[in-house]
Each structure stands twice: as structure tokens, then as C-alpha cells.
Image (cartoon, rainbow, N blue to C red):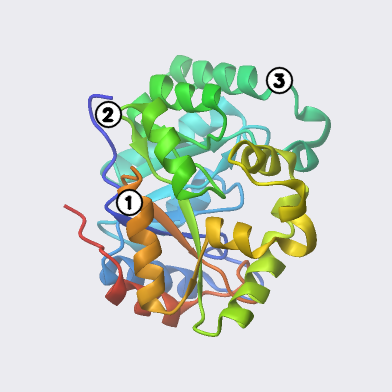
Amino acid sequence: MATQPALGKIGIWTAALRVTDSLSAQQVGEAAAELEELGYGTLWLGGSPSPDQAGALLEATGRITVATGILSIWDHDPAFVAERYAAIDAAHGGRFVLGLGVSHSALAGERYARPYSAMREYLAALDAAPTPVPASRRILAALGPKMLELSRDRAAGAHPYLVTPEFTAQAREILGDEALLAPDLKVVLEPDLDRARTIARDYLARYLALPNYTNNLLRLGFEEKDFADGGSERLLSGVFALGDAEAIRHRVDTFLAAGADHLAVQVVNTAPFTTLPHQEWRTLAEALPLGNG
């Protein structure tokens, strides 16, 4: 792409940074502003957010990039997305990145059909909108080779979820040198490794029920037995960073060395979808290479 979004080296991925019955707009805004002040390059809002939910984070900040991580193409009409993207992006100086994905059949239901073709059609609709969403301002959730190629050819790059350094190296080969590669990395900042693995397994179990993820993990050399009981130690070691801040930093460096341009760090605790882990974010900001040049 001619102009790539400025993601920085390290971002924060969270599905909790939105207004709920237990979290006010003020609390959400203050948390987003603190993450910007700490030096993170991008806020990734998970859980198939709407453009306007991402827009609320842009309103609360002044410099940081905000990305949807990811917006499900089954949940949001492309014409509406393009319209809202244009308005929000114009108001916030090019800080909005549209992360798109095909989600999962278990979540999308009967709408889920021909996901690769559906993504191509969705991108075409964004291109055909009165104010198109530029390819350089969108990024695709991609695991398989065809979707990685599409993220290279029709977007700024790829935002793969639940992956390993080995996957990252393979994805870099498919994407080439120019496309962005911004994988998610789940982090349990807990020095007691037995407790860290328990927290990780409780979180991972929901994803191991989704074939898009397990099929990709099988391609990477894991076996069905690795998916039992929330994940084997081998699997946890592959897709998580577990331990103290030094161990987390080492794992982050491994992903970057494998070819990631940016890591979307997701702090996993006992309630990751409903709580904002302020202290973990602060600790990681001191430990990780946040340089955003």
C-alpha cells in the first residue's frame, strides 16, 4: 500500500474498552487516554465493535491509532461502515484503522457461507462506496493462505488471532516485505506458572470450540490431544506469553523476530471481557519495546 497506518510496535487488544452497565463512558475514555499516555501505538477494540464504538475511543484520545479487532462482516452493512468510517476518519486525522474478519460459523449462524468470497465482496462494496475505505486503512483477520494473500493484495495487511511465532514467520513469507503483519498475543502476567496456565485454559477453551482456530493450529503441527481440557502445556506455550514481565518481554521479542511489525497484546485475567487491567497495562508499558517510530 502507498500509505500504511501507523500502528507502532506494541498495541493493546481488549474487548472490554466499551460502555456497559458496569463501565461508564468516562471510565472508558480515561482508560483509553491512559493507554495513549503510556506509549502504546494502537488500541484494538475486540468483539466485533461498530465504527462508532471505535469512534468513542478516538474522541477520548489525541494521537493513538484505534482499530477494530475485528468488525465482523456479517454484523455490519458495508455501505454503513464506509459512511461511518469516512466521517470518523475525517474527524480524527487518519487514526482509524478498519479491522475486518469473517468471524465463525458458530457466531454468524446461517449467514456464514463462502467466507473468502464474502470477504472479497465486502471489500468490493467498500471500494464502491461514495467515499471508499482506502485499502491502506483496512486490515484483515487472516489465518489461511488465501485470506493472507487477500490481506496483502486488498488491504494494508493481516491481523491474525491465536497464532504462534512459527505461524508469524509463515505469514510473513506470504505477505512479503511491504504488507503489515499485526498478530494478537495473549498475555497472562502471573509469575506462578500453574496459576497462569489455569487462567489461560479458562480463556482458551472457548476458542478451541471454533474450527477456524483449531484447523489453523492443526496446520501448525498441533494435534487433537492438544485441544483437550483447555489446551496442553505445549499449546499454551505456543499461543500465550505466560509469567512475569521479563518472560512476557522475551515472548514478545520472539514474535517480533519472526516477522511481526506490530503486536496486539491482550492481557488475559479472570474476567478479560468485563474488566480493565490497568496495573498490567502499566507494568507491560515499562517492560515492552513501545517505541512507535
Q: In this picture, is 193 found above or below 129?
A: below
Question: Quick one: 130 or 279, which is closer to the camera?
Answer: 279
Q: Which residue is mark 1?
A: 256
Residue 242 position, x and y percent, is 51, 71
Q: In this picture, is 272 found above or below 49?
A: below
**Could you give the CA–CA distance between mark 1 and mark 2, rounded to whole angstroms?**
15 Å
Q: Residue at x 62, y 21 (%)?
A: 116
Question: Quick one: 50 or 162, which is closer to the camera?
Answer: 162
Labels 1, 2: front one: 1
Q: Is residue 134 visible?
A: no
- Image disc number at residue 114: 3
**Could you give the CA–CA distance between mark 2 and mark 3, rounded to whole angstroms?**
28 Å
Q: Earlier in the sequence, mark 1 or mark 2?
A: 2
**Could you give the CA–CA distance between mark 1 and mark 3, rounded to whole angstroms?**
32 Å
Q: Which residue is mark 2?
A: 178
Q: Amino acid at mark 2?
A: Glu
How many callouts does the rendering have?
Answer: 3
Q: Secondary structure at mark 1?
A: helix
* Residue farthest along the left direction in this orientation: 293
Q: Residue at x 36, y 56 (%)?
A: 254
Question: Quick one: 238 or 63, which is closer to the camera?
Answer: 238
Q: Residue at x 50, y 42 (%)?
A: 160
Left or right: where 241 falls relative to 47: left
Q: Residue at x 58, y 40 (%)?
A: 220
Q: Quadrant of the N terminus?
A: top left
Labels 2, 3: front one: 2
Task: Rate crowding at label 3 as few (under 14), some (14 to 19) or many (20 or more) other CA atoms within 10 Å.
Answer: few
Q: Amino acid at mark 1?
A: Leu
Residue 72 position, x and y percent, is 62, 38
Q: Are marks 2 and 3 in contact (CB under 8 Å)?
A: no
- Image disc number at residue 119: none
Left or right: where 61 falls relative to 85: left
